[in-house]
Amino acid sequence: MKEWLVIHQIKALYKNGTGLSERKIAKELGISRHTVSKYLKMTEAEITKTKSETDRAKRLDDYRVYIIQLLQTYPGLSAVKIMRKLKAKVDDLIVSDRSVRRYIQALKQEISFKQPRYYEPVLDMIPGEQCQVDGGELRGVMIGGVETTVYIMVFVLSYSRLMHVSATTKAIDTKTLIHQHDSAFRYFGGMPKECVYDQTKLVVISEVFRELQLNQCFFQYATTAGFYIRVCEGYDPESKGKVEAGVKYVKHNGLYGETFANLQDLEKYLIEWLDNTANQRIHGTTKRQPREHYEHDERIKMQPYLTPAYTDNDPASMIIRKADKTGLISWQSNKYSVPMAYQCARVSVREQEGRLLISDLSNREILAEHVISLEKGQIIKNNHHYRDMSLHVQKLEDDLHQLLVNLPLTQSLCALLKATSPKIYKDQLYGAKQVLTQHIKANGVIPEVWLIKLIDLPRLTVTGLKERLEIYQQHPERLDNKADSSYQSANSLPALACYGALNDRLNGQGANHVIH
């Protein structure tokens, strides 16, 4: 409003060139001569547009923290993509691309984005973006008449402040932490994009120069579920201040002064306290009830959550092994095979009812099962793991054509093998290639009349092919048309009966033992 008053005074004193000069106007109003010159050159419409864009740009201050986080994590992110991410999070944001570009350009003059930060301020203004997680313990809680130490894990959504609490009487380990996350996400009815933690061993094994070695089991759970792990820098509780306050709130408002019959009674009490007190109170910062705030503005922005299939198993039993170049992993002084595609790769290994289960790390799919050997120094292999899966049917068919030369007869032979054994056709082609190669090396080119006799059969397998080639080689005189009456008789039978008749001849049954 003050700026518009100054602009009107400039226009009035100038009087379209008949009033004071720019210098005298600047002196009269106590402003810069350049400011006077700028507004005199602009029309009223141009001034209105400029001020409107400035007002819209100032709206981005509400999302300044989120924009800073994006730029610090991805310094090369364009203004257009930042705008797209903002609009995906905030439905009623109306800001032009030009305003965003100007805002980001000004922001880059103030803050350096050359190196990504490893922890960021809380993202208060972005729904569905972040959940803060922290644990604590409270001594002297009366459970069953005994003073007991209770270990709690508190989850607070940064936007709505919706809270979930898990409690146990045993120190929290990785397995328990995973189940507590599962309970929290199911209570929320969705999952945030990221979760923030301090440097607990349950999440971070070690840190050197902000290079983090994450707990493998927990990282596996987070990756499978689909949320990002964000770890605070050491001694920086402010970066997850909401959950720090939440832990104190649970201890003093939720648990202090209460007594419980058993652990189940404690868990039931916490759910009722969350539903009726913690998530129904008017929050001091948002001035809204967390549950109402969540349901109205945040639930729709949460990611869908499905409990990973392996969560019910003990994560500690999921052990990582790396296969060597021969596709073997070590387990209890023995070695076991994995499929060829997993040679030199990392896999998950666990025992179950005397069997060794080997799984893909990413999707938990079972890759191999072996009976666990009680001996030492053994190599247990599944020969199927070493089959050359790269051999393709077309390649094998082309190889047969190269061996037999006659394309129509080769195609007919392949069709007969496929019709006889469709489920193992590739294996039959591979076997036929070996049989034909060996026969040609030993005896020369296979006569065309032999191929005609072969493709006239109702059924043919690699074993039958080998036997017939040997018989044709030993008794070529029996391939003339005059000696073909017994074959014609067999060929007139139904297919299976004909196949049985030919097999009887091959097995030496029948009076004359004549083969065609």
Image (spheres, rainbow, N blue to C red):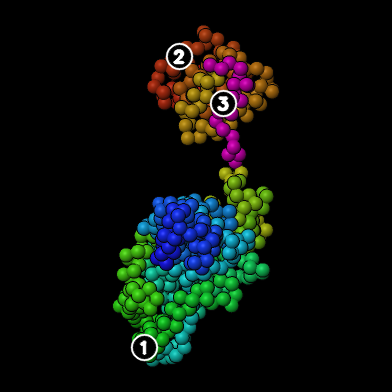
What residue type is disc 2 on?
Gln
Q: How far apart are marks 3 and 1 (CA)?
A: 79 Å
What residue type is disc 3 on?
Glu
**Residue ID at (43%, 72%):** 156
Q: Does the magenta stretch include residue 407?
A: yes
* Residue placed under numbered mark 1 in the picture: 258
Q: In this view, does 256 lie above or below 453?
A: below
Q: How many marks?
A: 3
**Residue ID at (48%, 17%):** 456
Front residue of 380 and 57: 57
Q: Is residue 189 visible?
A: no
**Residue ID at (44%, 64%):** 6
Instruction: Tell me the crowding category of disc 2: few under 14, some 14 to 19, or many 20 or more residues within 10 angstroms, Cα based.
Output: few
Mark 3 or mark 1, whichever is nearer to me: 1
Q: The magenta stretch spans which residues?
A: 387-408
Outermost residue on the front side: it is: 18
